[in-house]
């Protein structure tokens, strides 16, 4: 018991699992006990989610959000990789660094500009999402490039590789696993933004549009049920991306086998 | 012991390395010649010894062509200015690409060696057997022990086919059993080809002297900035080269004392 409150103490997996479950039960109990008329109890939220899951509305809306997220992620990764790879060329270094600074721009202030630049609501949502994601992706990837050990470049040089081949081997091939890691770490950002951008063009639906609709009618039970679903889907994608990364890049599994 | 010293293989002339006003290396000069012994392929094993922080790694990078000297020249085979890729380089801690299996890393090196064109797989199999790494060829570096990693790293540079092999602190952090194996391996490599030249940069005086034919001592001279080659010791001339039990000889102990005194 004392160990649980000691810095850097190592506990078994089983103990950790029991600890997390106990904390979860405690949190749910507190939620249940403190809920009044306005705040729905956890049981009601789970029941609402179960009910929503059987409706076509939820499945359709989740699918819309999922497809939009996937599309935005793919575009964002492609744009990120182009600028990140090119950032090692002095000509593009400034542009890449400018993209990094774009993190500080708020999407809300750019909606009108994007409305003028895009043809319809669907494109507006997509490009707002991409604009929101790319600076974070580029920031993460540039940080990886900056922290590449000199020895990786030196090894390429000693093998007689030219600069382009070194770029290919060390950054493109050598850091391919990091692309998925960035995707995994930043997925939460896109998932967070989707609810916001979907509110801009609600005609196509989406989980964000659904959330806004329930919020409008103060249907807190369904709002929380959707939040729970968004949270669970986020966990699922996180797990999927980690699994895909481990499968595609076996060297990321660090355990020794000899 | 019959031998002759023939053509110049590597020549370092008036090399200076400065960082701003700070002099790291000053007027470094030394020459490595091809040692010929009748009836065998005798390569060269040269050690560059010096105290920690004296500039050995900087000189190592210059020799490897990874960095340019502030002035002076480093040439191989008479007149070719050394550049990155000319030398096989085995880094301290035996760096390998973490995202490649050992086989893939070795194949990368083979593809850079025109002499192995079409026979890459055979060459890998042959050296893997000699270095006892056949069973780890399809593993990643992080799955290997320190010794296996070391052998794979040396093999990679051997397969690249350079006549010169540079080693940065190859003996650091090794236990005595592994150290003996490394020494045997280096000696095995040194006799694999007449022109094969091993340059060992180390502060492990005893092990370096035990396997070398020539020692260069890098140090600072009284009142002068930057390190330079203070002394050259021809171990062949002293009868201390190419002997398995050289450590038992009195001349060996005397040479170690001499080196320690001049560091």
Image: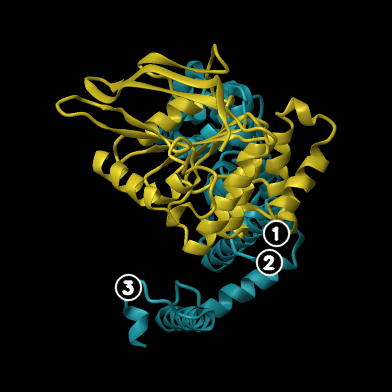
Q: Which mark is residue B37?
A: none
Please provide percent x and percent y for residue A55.
Answer: 74, 64
Secondary structure of the residue carrying tag 3 is: loop
Is residue B1 shown to the viewer in this render? yes
Q: Among all residues in the image, which is located at the extreme front?
A: B1
N-term mark: 3 or 2: 3
What chain is the yellow one? B
Say which residue label 1 marks.
A58
Say whether marks 1 and 2 touch (CB < 8 Å): yes
Q: For mark 3, does the 10 Å Cα neighbourhood hold few (<14), some (14 to 19), or many (20 or more) residues? A: few
* Quadrant in the rendering for residue B31: top left
Residue B96 against residue A29 in the figure, above or below: above
**Between A149 and A26, the one nearer to me in the picture:** A149
x then y, percent, for residue B56: 37, 35
Q: Residue furthest right?
A: B118
Q: Is residue A102 rendered to the left or right of residue B139?
A: left
A108 left or right, relative to B27:
right
Name the side, left or right, on which A104 lies relative to B167. Answer: left
* Residue with the mark numbered 3: A7
Tag nearer the camera, 3 or 2 = 3
C-alpha distance separating marks 1 and 2: 6 Å
Residue on which disc 2 sits: A52
**Percent x, y of residue B229:** 33, 28
Q: Residue furthest top?
A: B79
Q: Residue at x 61, y 22 (%)?
A: A162
């Amino acid at each position: 018991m004392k160990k649980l409150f000691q810095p850097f103490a190592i506990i078994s997996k089983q103990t950790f699992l029991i600890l997390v479950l106990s904390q979860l039960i405690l949190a749910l109990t507190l939620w249940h006990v403190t809920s009044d008329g306005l705040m729905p109890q956890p049981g009601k939220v789970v029941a609402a989610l179960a009910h929503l899951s059987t409706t076509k509305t939820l499945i359709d809306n989740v699918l819309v959000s999922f497809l939009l997220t996937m599309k935005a992620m793919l575009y964002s990764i492609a744009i990120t990789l182009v600028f990140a790879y090119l950032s090692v060329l002095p000509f593009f270094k400034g542009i890449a660094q400018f993209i990094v600074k774009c993190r500080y721009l708020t999407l809300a202030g750019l909606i009108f500009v994007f409305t003028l630049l895009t043809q319809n609501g669907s494109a507006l949502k997509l490009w707002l999402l991409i604009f929101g994601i790319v600076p974070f992706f580029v920031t993460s990837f540039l940080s990886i490039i900056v922290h590449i050990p000199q020895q990786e470049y030196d090894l390429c040089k000693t093998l007689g590789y030219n600069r382009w081949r070194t770029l290919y081997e060390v950054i493109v091939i050598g850091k391919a696993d990091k692309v998925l890691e960035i995707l995994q770490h930043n997925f939460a950002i896109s998932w967070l933004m989707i609810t916001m951008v979907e509110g801009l063009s609600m005609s196509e639906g989406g989980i964000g549009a659904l959330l806004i609709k329930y919020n409008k009618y103060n249907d807190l039970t369904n709002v929380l049920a959707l939040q729970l679903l968004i949270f669970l889907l986020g966990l699922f994608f996180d797990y999927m991306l980690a699994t895909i990364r481990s499968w595609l890049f076996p060297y990321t599994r660090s355990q020794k086998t000899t | 012991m019959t031998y002759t010293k023939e053509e110049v293989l590597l020549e370092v002339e008036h090399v200076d390395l400065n960082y701003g006003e700070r002099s790291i290396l000053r007027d470094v000069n030394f020459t490595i010649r091809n040692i010929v012994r009748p009836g065998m392929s005798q390569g060269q094993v040269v050690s560059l010894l010096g105290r920690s922080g004296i500039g050995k790694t900087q000189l190592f990078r210059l020799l490897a062509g990874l960095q340019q000297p502030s002035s002076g020249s480093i040439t191989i085979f008479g007149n070719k200015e050394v550049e990155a890729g000319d030398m096989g380089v085995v880094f301290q801690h035996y760096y390998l690409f973490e995202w490649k299996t050992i086989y893939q890393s070795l194949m990368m090196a083979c593809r850079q060696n025109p002499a192995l064109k079409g026979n890459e797989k055979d060459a890998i199999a042959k050296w893997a057997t000699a270095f006892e790494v056949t069973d780890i060829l399809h593993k990643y570096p992080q799955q290997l022990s320190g010794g296996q990693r070391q052998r794979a790293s040396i093999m990679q540079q051997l397969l690249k086919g350079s006549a010169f092999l540079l080693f940065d602190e190859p003996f650091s952090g090794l236990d005595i059993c592994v150290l003996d194996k490394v020494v045997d391996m280096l000696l095995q490599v040194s006799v694999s080809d007449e022109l094969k030249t091993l340059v060992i940069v180390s502060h492990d005086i005893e092990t370096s002297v035990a396997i070398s034919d020539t020692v260069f001592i890098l140090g600072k001279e009284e009142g002068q900035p930057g390190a330079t080659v203070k002394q050259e010791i021809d171990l062949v001339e002293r009868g201390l080269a190419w002997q398995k039990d050289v450590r038992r000889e009195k001349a060996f102990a005397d040479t170690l004392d001499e080196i320690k005194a001049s560091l």
